[in-house]
Image: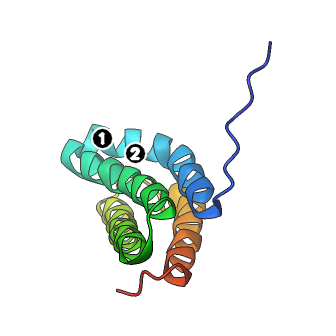
Amino acid sequence: MQTKSPRFTFDVLRIAIEAIEGLAPAVARIKRCDPDLADQLKRALSSVALNAAEGHRSRGGNSVARYSTAAGSNAEARAALRVAVAWGYVAGSEVAAGEENLDRVAAMLYRLGARK
């Protein structure tokens, strides 16, 4: 019997998960060169998805706070990817699709109220 992937009705969460899936091999490569950077990147990527999901189920100012935390973690993940490329741990082409997804996530979070 074939199992189906969970369907995400909340697009920002779906795209954040897609970014994680697409970047997982690059994170593994980064870990071989710089375990601390890989751990920080992994935690930031997880935080994007988790805080977006929490914001979706929160109300009022709490949702904006969670979306803002997700946006901050998204910026951290994007910076960590640039640092990894700069150090030569991975090629820019290896992380390009993941960066595109994170760019989409940033725009969605902004529209959801994460302004800073």
| Residue type beneath disc 2 | Val
Looking at the rendered image, the quarter that the C terminus falls into is bottom left
Disc 1: CA contacts within 10 A as few (<14), some (14-19) or many (>=20): some
Q: Give the image quarter of residue 78.
A: bottom left
The answer to whether marks 2 and 1 mark residues whose Cβ atoms lie closer than 8 Å is yes
Mark 2, secondary structure of its residue: helix
- The residue that appears at 37% across and 77% down in the rendered structure is 61
Q: Residue at the bottom extreme?
A: 115
The amino acid type of the residue labelled 1 equals Lys
Q: Position of residue 39 (x, y in %)?
A: 26, 45
Where does the image place residue 62, in percent across and percent down from the top left? Answer: 36, 70
Question: Helix or strand or loop: what does disc 1 sit on?
Answer: helix
Looking at the image, which is closer to me, 108 or 80?
108
**Residue 114 shows in the view:** yes
Residue 51 vs residue 92, the one in the foreground: 51
On-image quarter of the N terminus: top right
Q: Which residue reaches farthest front?
A: 59
Horizontal arrangement in the rendering, residue 103 relative to residue 8 (left or right): left
Residue on which the image places disc 1: 31
- Residue 114 to residue 57: above or below: below
Q: Is residue 81 left or right of residue 22?
A: left
Q: Mark 2 = which residue? A: 27
Point out residue 3 in the picture as x, y percentages from the top left corner: 74, 22
As drawn, 22 above or below 85: above
